[in-house]
């Protein structure tokens, strides 16, 4: 397995994608369309090798993991692999995490209907909080599960079959989409309609505040860091208020239509309110490597130049409906925070920390592991960056090192082949 090619190393997103190994020649692959408890359709790919009695399910709330680097690694070790998308794959405009775990449930039901001796979940990056949320809700009595989204929309988790997995694996899980964005969002935005306006006192890219030209590490004072993080929280609070007002506005239109049957009110109830969230790649730790120190390279999840990617088109939570903002991207309103959900994870758990992670920092890993409700928890650290790249040129990839740890743990607690 090798990292991205040298030719691509100068691109803004260099290091994000890792080349995968070949899957075993005797792999059997099948594609399946599943119906969720609330009537949505989702798709998954099941890969098996002869004699596999354990299946590992990989899933992410927003991304297609069909070709995840761990797929061939797990297959070569004798485990079956299920990769599944949500109803919001590659388009998180309307991503509601309470619906995403219904999507996960459909996959778990499907796998329980097969002849596997054990079914485990594997959450990488945002898949970690998604599966933590699933485990928490699946472990509750149906009547104790959530019945509404953070926007107040009804969701029938109580009526869904939500099989409890036999084990949980987490690889470089970040604290949750909303918790992550709370650290990434640029608080120097002065007008949500203006992508370029900057409050100089909070500008992370101003030398007056401690910024240094890349790749030199910036150096921010404790006072600036404190003000910056408070302002990040304040911006999310403002965006939450906007989202809730949009939700209320739509609700009022529904009520008017119910009373009037007027098509004008119906159109008002259906008209989309899409929030544009500018500049969401500005965690100070991307720039100042003395903050939460680990082995990470300079830069963010999106590349080596946060001063540029922060202003770019691609970014977390860039476009979201009010419902999706509150359910997924608000670190203050989302139910899908890892630490919040972790006490509900009570099955044997493996937590793989990558020493150069740019999203799960050392103190995050400690907090997440300590929050887990399982009696059987294994926490290992391997060298690698968030997406499984190598720490340095010529070093093994984090994905291959993690795969070895995962394979060994699975063999110890579950059998690979019948």
Image (cartoon, helix red, strand yellow):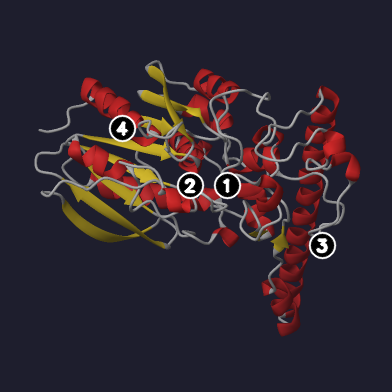
Residue tagged 2: 16
Q: In the depicted view, which residue is nearer to us: 333 or 239?
A: 239
Q: Give the side of residue 257 with respect to residue 95, left or right.
A: right
Q: Secondary structure at mark 1?
A: loop
Which numbered disc, 3 or 4, marks the residue that appears first in the sequence?
3
Position of residue 308 measured from the top left corner of the image (x, y, whole percent): 69, 52
Position of residue 298 measured from the top left corner of the image (x, y, whole percent): 60, 36
Which numbered disc, 3 or 2, marks the residue that appears first in the sequence?
2
Instruction: Name which residue lies at 87% across and 52% down.
Output: 190
Instruction: Name which residue lies at 60% across and 48% down.
Output: 328
Q: Give the side of residue 235 with respect to residue 23, left or right.
A: right
Q: CA distance from mark 3 to mark 4?
A: 44 Å
Residue tagged 3: 193
Which numbered disc, 1 or 4, marks the residue that appears first in the sequence?
1
Q: CA distance from mark 1 to mark 4?
A: 24 Å
Comparing labels 1 and 3, the label whose residue is closer to the camera: 1
Mark 4 residue crowding within 10 angstroms, few (<14) / some (14–19) / many (20+):
many
Q: Disc 3 vs disc 4: Cβ atoms closer than 8 Å? A: no
Whether residue 152 can be seen here? no
Q: CA distance from mark 3 to mark 2?
A: 29 Å
Which numbered disc, 2 or 4, marks the residue that appears first in the sequence?
2
Q: CA distance from mark 2 to mark 4?
A: 18 Å
Residue tagged 4: 403
Q: Disc 1 vs disc 2: Cβ atoms closer than 8 Å? A: yes
Residue tagged 1: 303
Q: In the depicted view, which residue is nearer to us: 117 or 377?
A: 377
């Amino acid at each position: 397995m090798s990292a991205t090619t040298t030719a691509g190393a100068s691109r803004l997103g260099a290091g994000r994608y890792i080349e995968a190994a070949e899957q075993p020649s005797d792999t059997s692959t099948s594609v399946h369309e599943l119906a969720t408890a609330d009537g949505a359709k989702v798709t998954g790919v099941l890969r098996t090798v002869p004699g596999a009695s354990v299946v590992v399910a990989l899933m992410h709330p927003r991304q297609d993991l069909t070709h995840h680097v761990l797929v061939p690694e797990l297959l070569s070790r004798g485990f079956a692999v299920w990769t599944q998308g949500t109803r919001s794959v590659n388009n998180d405009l309307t991503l509601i995490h309470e619906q995403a775990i219904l999507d996960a449930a459909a996959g778990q039901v499907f796998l329980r209907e097969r002849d596997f001796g054990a079914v485990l979940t594997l959450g990488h990056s945002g898949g970690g909080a998604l599966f933590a949320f699933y485990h928490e809700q699946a472990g509750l009595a149906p009547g104790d599960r959530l019945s509404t989204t953070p926007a107040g929309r009804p969701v029938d988790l109580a009526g869904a079959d939500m099989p409890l997995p036999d084990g949980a694996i987490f690889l470089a899980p970040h604290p949750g989409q909303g918790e992550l964005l709370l650290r990434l969002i640029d608080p120097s935005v002065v007008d949500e309609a203006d992508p370029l306006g900057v409050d100089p006192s909070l500008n992370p890219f101003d030398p007056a505040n401690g910024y240094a030209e890349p790749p030199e590490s910036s150096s921010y004072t404790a006072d600036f860091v404190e003000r910056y993080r408070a302002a990040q929280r304040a911006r999310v609070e403002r965006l939450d208020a906007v989202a809730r007002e949009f939700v209320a506005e739509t609700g009022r239109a529904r009520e008017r239509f119910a009373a009037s049957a007027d098509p004008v009110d119906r159109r008002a109830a259906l008209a989309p309110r899409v929030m544009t969230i500018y500049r969401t790649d500005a965690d100070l730790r991307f720039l100042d490597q003395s903050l939460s120190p680990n082995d990470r390279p300079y830069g963010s999840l999106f590349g080596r130049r946060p001063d540029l990617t922060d202003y770019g088109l691609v970014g977390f939570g860039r476009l979201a409906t009010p419902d999706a903002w509150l359910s997924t991207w608000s670190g203050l309103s989302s139910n899908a925070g890892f630490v919040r959900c972790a006490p509900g994870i009570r099955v044997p758990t493996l937590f793989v920390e990558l020493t150069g992670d740019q999203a799960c920092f050392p103190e995050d890993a400690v907090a997440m592991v300590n929050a887990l409700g399982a009696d059987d928890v294994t926490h290992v650290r391997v060298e690698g960056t968030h997406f499984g790249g190598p720490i340095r040129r010529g070093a093994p990839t984090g994905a291959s090192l993690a795969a070895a740890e995962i394979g060994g743990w699975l063999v110890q607690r579950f059998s690979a082949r019948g």
